[in-house]
Image (cartoon, helix red, strand yellow):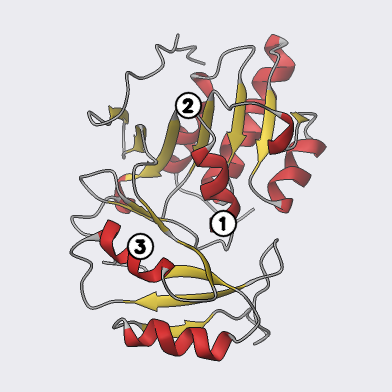
Amino acid sequence: MASVDSSQAEAARFAASLIESGMTIGLGSGSTAELFVRRLAERIHDENLRIVGVSTSVSTSELASSLGITLAELDDVAELDLDIDGADEVDPQFQMIKGRGGKLLREKIVAAAARQRMIVVTEAKRVDRLGRHFPVPVEVSSFGISHTERALQALGAQTSIRTDADGSIVVTDGGNRIVDCRFVSIDDPLNLDIQLHRVPGVLETGIFVGLCDILIVGKRNDVVRIDNPASKPPIAFHVKRS
């Protein structure tokens, strides 16, 4: 996996320490989620935990399976106890931009199915306003993509269809495409999300509102848990430090 800093690794390790036996949890995608999955697998093996994971991507499924984590399909479980994922940006209202790894559609579906959502980030991912560092990824149908892109531009976005390093167009796990949309300013993330969803061809956006109940922040010499006051009462985790 790509190199990570110590604060990212410690934040993922702390998040894994909160998981309790018997939980059904959503497993996110990206570098932080990968660190979490690896540490969770260690705990499962060392402590004989009973954990069922529901993956947000093919890559996470492959990793979790290789590490011996029991997986289930989302439609085979009634509810998730907890979803754990990373984020590209998080603002003071716990609103987020996600999807730099291209898994936003499945990530949002899994997050919405969970009783509680835990987001694990480093301090660098916290911003005063969304869009400071990253564009908003928008997952779209491949059919009529040029028309969809022009409609997104009409909303004020500077757009680019996401490509790989070799120039080939990125295809998501669902067989869709991603249009990255950069806005001069995102003053109202929820309203922007609504406007983007009104564009024919848009399947999902990387604006995540109301989907962060617990924020785990890795700092230089510390890990901090911040509960979203707007969320329902958080799970009373019994922290297992290691």
The CA distance from mark 2 to mark 3 is 22 Å
Q: Earlier in the sequence, mark 1 or mark 3?
A: 1
Amino acid at pointer 2: Arg
Label 3: which secondary element: helix
Q: How many marks?
A: 3
Local packing at callout 2 (Cα closer than 10 Å; few below 14, some 14-19, many 20+) is some
Label 1: which secondary element: helix
Q: Which mark is residue 193?
A: 3
Q: Which mark is residue 164?
A: none
Local packing at callout 1 (Cα closer than 10 Å; few below 14, some 14-19, many 20+) is many
Q: Nearer the viewer, residue 161 or 190?
A: 190
Q: Residue at x 60, y 81 (%)?
A: 163
Q: Which mark is residue 105?
A: 1
Q: Nearer the viewer, residue 241 or 229?
A: 229
Q: Earlier in the sequence, mark 2 or mark 3?
A: 2
The CA distance from mark 2 to mark 1 is 18 Å
Label 2: which secondary element: loop
Look at mark 2 in the image and give the residue it sits on: 115
Q: Nearer the viewer, residue 39 or 85?
A: 85
Instruction: Using the image, determine if residue 147 lies above or below residue 30.
Output: below
List x then y, in percent, for residue 3: 55, 54
Q: Earlier in the sequence, mark 2 or mark 1?
A: 1
Amino acid at pointer 3: Asp
Quarter location, residue 135:
bottom left
Amino acid at pointer 1: Leu
Quarter location, residue 27:
top right
Q: Residue at x 27, y 31 (%)?
A: 228
Image-based side of 99 in relation to 35, left or right? left
